[in-house]
Image (tube, coloured by chain):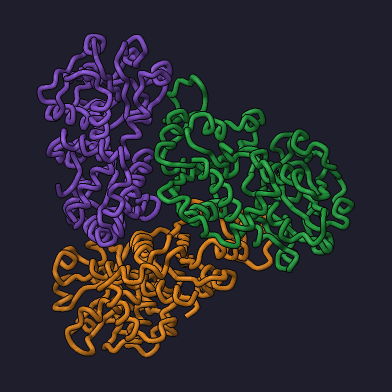
Chain colours: A purple, B green, C orange
Amino acid sequence: MKHYTSINDIDNLEEWIVDAKAIKKNPLEHRKLGKNKTLGLLFFNSSLRTRLSTQKAALNLGMNPIVMNVSNDSWGIEFGDGTVMDGTTAEHIKEAAAVVSQYCDIIAVRAFPTLTDKAKDESEEVLNAFKKYATVPIVNMESATAHPLQGLTDALTISEYAKKERPKVVLTWAPHVKALPHAVGNSFAQVMQKMDVDFVITNPEGYDLNPEITRDVPVLHNQEEAMKNADFVYAKNWSSYENYGQILETNKSWMITKSLLGNAKFMHCLPVRRNVVVEDAVLDSDSSLVIQQANNRTFAAQLVLKKLLETL
Amino acid sequence: MKHYTSINDIDNLEEWIVDAKAIKKNPLEHRKLGKNKTLGLLFFNSSLRTRLSTQKAALNLGMNPIVMNVSNDSWGIEFGDGTVMDGTTAEHIKEAAAVVSQYCDIIAVRAFPTLTDKAKDESEEVLNAFKKYATVPIVNMESATAHPLQGLTDALTISEYAKKERPKVVLTWAPHVKALPHAVGNSFAQVMQKMDVDFVITNPEGYDLNPEITRDVPVLHNQEEAMKNADFVYAKNWSSYENYGQILETNKSWMITKSLLGNAKFMHCLPVRRNVVVEDAVLDSDSSLVIQQANNRTFAAQLVLKKLLETL
Amino acid sequence: MKHYTSINDIDNLEEWIVDAKAIKKNPLEHRKLGKNKTLGLLFFNSSLRTRLSTQKAALNLGMNPIVMNVSNDSWGIEFGDGTVMDGTTAEHIKEAAAVVSQYCDIIAVRAFPTLTDKAKDESEEVLNAFKKYATVPIVNMESATAHPLQGLTDALTISEYAKKERPKVVLTWAPHVKALPHAVGNSFAQVMQKMDVDFVITNPEGYDLNPEITRDVPVLHNQEEAMKNADFVYAKNWSSYENYGQILETNKSWMITKSLLGNAKFMHCLPVRRNVVVEDAVLDSDSSLVIQQANNRTFAAQLVLKKLLETL
């Protein structure tokens, strides 16, 4: 593995989950592996869990994390080829990525989509520019279309809490007040296709995710039907993919309630808006795995960093 | 001690001061205690001394500090119970505190008061939410009503510089251009009541601190009279408590001058506005202890972190 | 050396370059020197390379870096003597510098010029206030008039890539859309005067740098003539010094092109605006040394920190 920027970079999910569980049991076992190595964490966007858990993972491996909020701490970065840079951007990614590569042994990047320019978002301009111009491994801390650290976390969590072989897992769209990216939904859909689960997606009409990602996964527009006998319900809002980045007229009834959930475990990547995406009664019950998921972020990140450190 | 959020968490001030002095003499003695432990420093507000000294204290104990400016680095946090989160807050403290607890062994929080909503401020909403929902010890880096790291620092400093038993200590209100919190005044008043000193408070009428905090401490409205024969004069501005958060008409004559100070030592928590709160001649003289106080912030924080680490 | 704030602090450039090359060969050799020592990095302005490379240098020496964005993380600092601080500044540099000195063993500061008040900029108010009131060594991470970490880096880079004795080095002004400081140009001009090179400066009329800095260096207003047979061309924009901080009418033809460059190596401190300062064809060719320069920032900073640590 050269970079970790997509669920496709997981060559063998089953083995990765075994490895992640071992790391979770003994998080400090490999703390010499990262000695004198630096992880650069570059945030083009806000972050809480990713910011803290990735630093924690690096520290567990003995690495030195250096955090940078790109826009606040420095200046606008240019991504266009051949641009006459007489506008607001002050440094080209060609220089920025090559330079940061010299100070950091691994670079982790967070860069959200525009949600207005589909082609630009799908080109993963920022992430791919780092892959192209950096000379060290790149870790995706959520890009325009993918959040593979979250996806790996989620697979680990399901593996830990599954009480039967081939559990039923439902990814359900949920209401929200803002137009949100598809990254979490995409990576979850991808990682579930690599796992031995009965996987179903449900969302209102007009909200189907990119079919190149969901492939043969059944997509139902009837939430109640989809959630029947579910073992795990993963809720997440996303804006329309077809009417790219739009919020269509939606039914608040898609909010996850205790009665809708039944006996399933509830999952969400957080942050979550209470009583909009999911009601208090779910989050405050034993059915919720959201805190356990967040805990697993550390070990997913640590596995990825460990694998990349081993290639250096 | 489960948390350190108030001067009331100090069980035996005399012993704590002895311990703090020992740490100051040999700051690296316990540097293995914090090995592989993480201190999360969450700032809802600006900070210089607290930011640096608390990190320094953590490093002296071998801990890894992780700093986060909550509002800039992530998003608005919701504190209300049962709220339908369709507004500006994106994550509930229930999740945020529980999640951060999984990445950090101790969480330190700074969250200033509104100074407009007395009931909300007195409820210590942010701090108490962290105490309630976090699963690790909480350290108060200045909350709505208290700044107990500063209070402990101040007691240590007075103990170091006292030249006689039971010195006279005066907490005096001083002028300022902005409405300021009561936190520093409160914690100083509380810690002085635990110390064997002759303690007096002086402030203009209308500026009396919360009587539940000042209790039996004499409060004089005549500054000159209060400061007579003082050994230590601690100056600090605060807005009105009665007319909550207001700046009443004030007399600039309350500014601390060399002649007003007499032979007393001058103390202030910093930052201090020169020639508004106190004149240059005081700060630039040997009578001022403000730099020594700031130095003690490290050792007060280190004692608190050490005590909390020992409970883990 | 007490501080490193100007190229004048380099007592023997030749020796320093030898030492820097040794550090580059074995960056971790002195990693015990900085053990339990703290480097405070105070940014009054944005930074990418300096921020990361100086932290990296500190880590290579085993130091703990603590980063602070002064304006965002804390509040306005007052530099005036005798000011009645009833305005926007909340803390005087006298206190701030003395206090930070107690938490940090070395303080590194970045503070750009106003470009409107020449006298103020030339007084190096911020940097000199730190030198005056701090009690620990100060490192200049780019001040109003100097960027000596960059200058040292540039001398090291030229020394590495020179293919003959006494190479010809040209510092050329280049176009830009914003009014920029003179700091990089100044420090480069100063360090070249300490090196055995054939050094020439070229800029349009009206853009001559401070003659007290350029001294006897030939300043040509004909770029093409100046660049003839150059071995190294260092491009940098700066605003007018005479019409202080102004952008005069300029000719875009001063942009560095492949044909203008000839066989010379191209240097720039970065960030650089592509196709404004220099065309893509130069930066994307083997003639460009900008990435190698940026790499050397770590080792220049590390040499400076090592020298200062040895005095503690």
Instruction: Residue A257: give x, y in percent of width and height.
Output: 36, 13
Q: Nearer the viewer, residue A92 or A220?
A: A220
Left of B37 or right of it: where is B285?
right
Left of B187 or right of it: where is B25?
left
Outermost residue on the left side: it is A216
Instruction: Residue C99: give x, y in percent of width and height.
Output: 59, 62
Q: Quadrant of the N terminus of chain B?
A: top right
**Image height of A262 relative to C84, above or below:** above
Left of C184 or right of it: where is C157?
left
The answer to which image quadrant residue B189 occupies is top right
Q: Nearer the viewer, residue A28 or B293?
A: A28
Q: Residue at x 34, y 16 (%)?
A: A256
Left of C255 or right of it: where is B155?
right
Instruction: Residue A172: give x, y in percent of width and height.
Output: 26, 20
The answer to which image quadrant residue A90 occupies is bottom left
Q: Residue at x 58, y 42 (%)?
A: B140
Instruction: Residue C167: give x, y in percent of width and height.
Output: 22, 86
The reply to whether residue A241 is visible in this rendering is yes
The reply to whether residue C69 is visible in this rendering is no
Q: How many marks?
A: 0
